[in-house]
Amino acid sequence: MTAAVPEPRPLSRQVPAEGIRLRGVFHTYGRGTPHEVTALRGVDLDIAPGQFVAVVGHNGSGKSTVAKHLNVLLQPTEGDVWVDGLNTRDPAARMAIRRRVGMVFQNPDNQIVGITVEHDVAFGLENLGLPVEVIEQRIDEALRLLGIEHLRHEPPHRLSAGQKQRLAIAGVVAMRPRYMVLDEATALLDPAGRAEVLDCIVRLNREEGLGVVWITHFMEEAVHADQVVVMEGGQVVMAGTPRQVFQQAEEIRRLRLDVPLVTRIAAGLRERGLPVPADAVFLEEVVQSVCRSASGD
Amino acid sequence: MLDDIILGQYVPGDSFLHRLDPRTKMILSALLAVLVFVVHTWTGYALYFAFTAALAAVGRIPPRYLARGMRPMVFFGVITFLFQLVFVREGRAVLDLWILTVTDRGVVEGFFMCFRLLLVVLVVLLFTLTTSAVELAEAVDRLLRPLRRVGVNSYDVGLVLSGAIRFVPTLLEQADKVKKAQMARGVVFEQGNLIERGRKVTAILVPLLLNVVRRADELGMAMEARCYQGGVGRTSRMQLRTGARDWVAAAVSVAWGVMLVWAGL
Ligand SMILES: Nc1ncnc2c1ncn2[C@@H]1O[C@H](COP(=O)(O)OP(=O)(O)OP(=O)(O)O)[C@@H](O)[C@H]1O
Ligand SMILES: [Mg+2]
């Protein structure tokens, strides 16, 4: 890919008022060095406020690179990223964008700065320059939302992995972002910890209207999403509701990914002639249609 | 050995020492540390030790805990002692071993250097055990603030310090993991001569160091994502207050130091 030089240029005009929008985003790591890697090759993506978007894709498909574009940790080599109408290329908008888009990474140990739980939650708030009373209030609120009030004075190394990750999320939630990007935030957790963290995020999405970008290798986690985005080779190759995406089982397998277990079971049942919907993603709907056909006979 | 490194492991409490303004504690600790190099008699060291012991009592730090913290330093103490034995030539010879001559002066200097080292560590321990990393960072930031005019970001310095402390347990855990991984491959750490042991330790340190670099990189990114911009426009949750307590502590320490120097101890 010969990318155009990303020299200062007029910021693009077609600015959406709300939501995150990526248009023709290219990103090349180590440009001009022998280690040049083009990680993104023209990504278009729209994330509406309050939407839960799951991003899946094979290792190296560019998921983390996209994530880092959403709060200006990386700049596009070509193309544009807007967050609520602010272009990430605009240096003046950088802090405003970071306030809007929170980011949680895979390893909680590498994002916790504070010596105790409450000090860590305070870190981002202090950076925002909020008055002390507001900071205290926001700490209480965030700890409550994530269910870790009782750990308030604990040092991070005494927490379980799931608790640490919830702390990392609390530190971001306290800053009251409109969107939150979680890059494989559950990858290092055991099943219980994973469920613990996902439940928190789903609740924040439903109850607080937090927009969520959930990057994961676990297809089961993607069924909760409003939109599933599949990446491959630095491009978005599929996007749609979980039902639309997982219905295309062949295509998904070609991309070296799995469809959720429930979808696979549903497909198997259909092959044997049971009237199970082809786009099933929840266990409950499969169970119900099987029961209905059993009692109907 | 790794478990013995308690440097920087704050013991929560509300003793007189805990409640001192961290800036006061920091300045007084620094003065005390300097004083240790002025003292040059047995009585002087005995009094100095008595004072630090009293401080430990005031700070309600269990002596056992302190002793454990000092344990890794004993090795360096012994080295320092031997070094003086070998290299001090003045004084009356008390022992003649081939090319080595040990003088009475050497023995005394050996003890003194060893005391100095251990006492300085003791003072540092007393400070870190009664000062939380947050207070430490805040104190450093405030004390170095005048240096902002010459381009030193005092907030960053404080943050680096508290970050180092925050990561001590994480790194120890990591070191332990690497060590166990090596043991699983059949490495026996308690065996072999000094060189072999050194090689085994290196096999732990290298992966550990790589890990630190990667960690630092990710941590930097996570901090930036949380709107960190080097303390500019930042508010601080912690309010430092100097009170009567601080003046008392300062007066007592200074008076005691002046006395030691004045008495020529
Ligand atoms: N800092 C970097 N420097 C150079 N190349 C990089 C860097 N980060 C990522 N890459 C490369 O960019 C490509 C996309 O990486 P990215 O981390 O975005 O993938 P990913 O989808 O997040 O993968 P994973 O599932 O393994 O996390 C990969 O080929 C990777 O090797
Ligand atoms: Mg990734």
Image: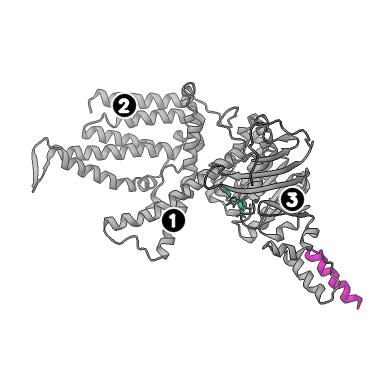
Q: Is residue A278 left or right of residue A156?
A: right
**Chain holding disc 3:** A
The number of callouts visible is 3
Name the mark nearer the viewer: 1 or 2.
1
For the residue pair B135 and A207, the one nearer the viewer reads as A207
Inspect the magenta stretch and tell me whether residue A37 lies in it. no
Q: Position of residue A60 (x, y in %)?
A: 61, 54
Q: Mark 3 CB in 8 Å range of ligand 1?
A: no
Q: Which residues are magenta?
A: A278-297
For the residue pair A263 and A46, the one nearer the viewer reads as A46
Cα gap from disc 2 to disc 3, whole angstroms? 66 Å
Q: Which element type, helix, strand or loop, lies under badge 3? A: strand
Q: Is residue B25 visible?
A: yes
Which is nearer the N-term, disc 1 or disc 2? Answer: 1
Q: Which element type, helix, strand or loop, lies under badge 1? A: helix
Cα gap from disc 1 to disc 2, whole angstroms? 42 Å
Q: Is residue B56 visible?
A: no
Decide whether the magenta segment is chiefly helix, strand or loop: helix
CB within 8 Å, label 1 to label 2: no
Outermost residue, bottom side = A297
Q: Which residue, given by chain and number where applicable, does mark 2 sit on?
A: B257
Against A199, residue A297 (above or below) is: below
Q: Are the residues under marks 1 and 2 on the same chain?
A: yes
- For the point 66% across and 46% down, the residue is A67
Q: Which residue, given by chain and number where applicable, does mark 3 sit on?
A: A53
Which amino acid lies under the numbered mark 2 shown in the image of this protein?
A: Gly
Which amino acid lies under the numbered mark 3 shown in the image of this protein?
A: Val
> Which quadrant of the figure contains the C terminus of chain B?
top left
Q: Which element type, helix, strand or loop, lies under badge 2? A: helix
Q: Which residue, given by chain and number where applicable, does mark 1 sit on?
A: B176
Q: Position of residue B11 (x, y in %)?
A: 46, 43
